Image (spheres, rainbow, N blue to C red):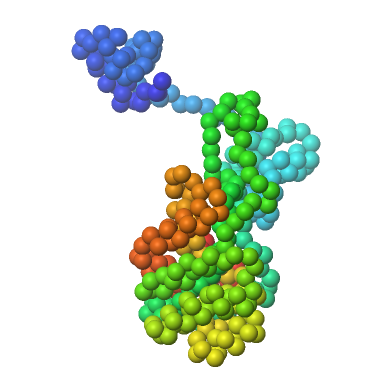
Amino acid sequence: MPRLRENERNQLIGMIRGGVSVSTVAHHFNVTRRTVYVTLQRERATGSQKDRPRRLGRRKTTDKEDTFIRLSHLRDRFKTAGQTTAEINNIRQSNPISKWTVLRRLKTFGLRARPPACRTRLTSYNIRNRHDWVRIHSFWPRQVWNNHMFSDESKFLLERQDGRKRLFRSVNERFVPQCLSQARAFGGRSVMVWGGITAAGKTPLVTVHGSLTARRYIDEILRPQVVPAIHNQGLTFMQDNAPAHRARITDQFLYENNIPVLHPWPPYSPDLNPIAHLWDLLDRRVRMRQPQPQTLLQLERALHEEWDNIPQQAVQRLIGSMRRRCQAVILSRGHHTRY
């Protein structure tokens, strides 16, 4: 039952003095009759309905220990509360504290246990390369970015475990067959696709069967999809540093067909490619379909249908975020960003 606030207790006393029955007052405030009687007795004894002063418990940690807890977890973000508790108890020798005390102190400093974000490991060369690249391109206006075609490949799994599914079960039903989410080893089967986006539209989604070699990249993607779009709209082509993209025959093909390329693209920088967010949007749209794809052919068909149904406003919004992406990398000094 809810605890009555001071104004509600004063209102309760007024209703009783006005002749309202105890049962009616209890039902009105959603409390028991005993709560009404206790409130009346307290008002007769003290003449007030203010909260009584409460004596706070003695803190088990000193200010220096609180500072140690905060700094130790800021210096090592993966340090556990149990490790910090053991260190403090070893110094104290008496009156040990529990890990819950450490967790409460961390909570007061705004630090909570959260899962880490997973990103690719960046070397010092990668960080410096990313920072130098965005310093040059962060001043480009939106009109310049609108004259680019951003492209990439992505793999979509038929079955996967992303930790987002939830079910309702009792305590002892964890391994009951009806409560298990079964999946194939190594993610099971998948479909790889290629796509390109511009401020004016999207290229058709291309399904890549098997490994994407440089020759297949030229014959199945560049020649039929990229070259006509680049020549018709006067765009600059963007591609990452995948082996098929950086092969010698690929560079020669792009040069012979007068395809301007955004060089050099910083390695390990999916946060700078706006199409990466479009892959996530495409995946969520496919997962929302009912019924879910059960075969690779159904998954491929769903990917093509949802790709065509993505509104162009979403693509334009992603391309328009390029300056913000560059500024975010500058603020992080070349490290990973929220994008």
Compare residues 85 and 58 and report the one nearer the observer. Answer: 85
Above/below status of 19 relative to 279: above
Q: Find residue 165 and report its image quarter.
A: top right
Q: In this view, does 150 lie to the left or right of 11?
A: right
Residue 189 appearing in the image: yes
* Towards the viewer: 171 or 77: 171
**How many numbered circles are shown?**
0
The residue sitting at 27% across, 12% down in the picture is 24
Residue 85: horizontal and vertical position, in percent?
A: 71, 40
Question: To which quarter of the image does residue 197 belong?
Answer: bottom left
Image: 118 above or below 294 = below
Is residue 63 visible from the viewing direction of this image?
Answer: no
- Furthest residue toward front: 297
Residue located 53% across and 75% down the image: 221
The front one of 283 and 117 is 283
Percent position (x, y) of residue 202? 41, 70
- Side of 94 where 99 appears, left or right: left
> In which quadrant is the N terminus drawn?
top left
Q: Where is residue 214 in the image (x, y as percent from the top left)?
A: 63, 77
Residue at (60%, 68%) from the top-left corner? 335
Q: Where is residue 50 in the image (x, y as percent from the top left)?
A: 37, 24
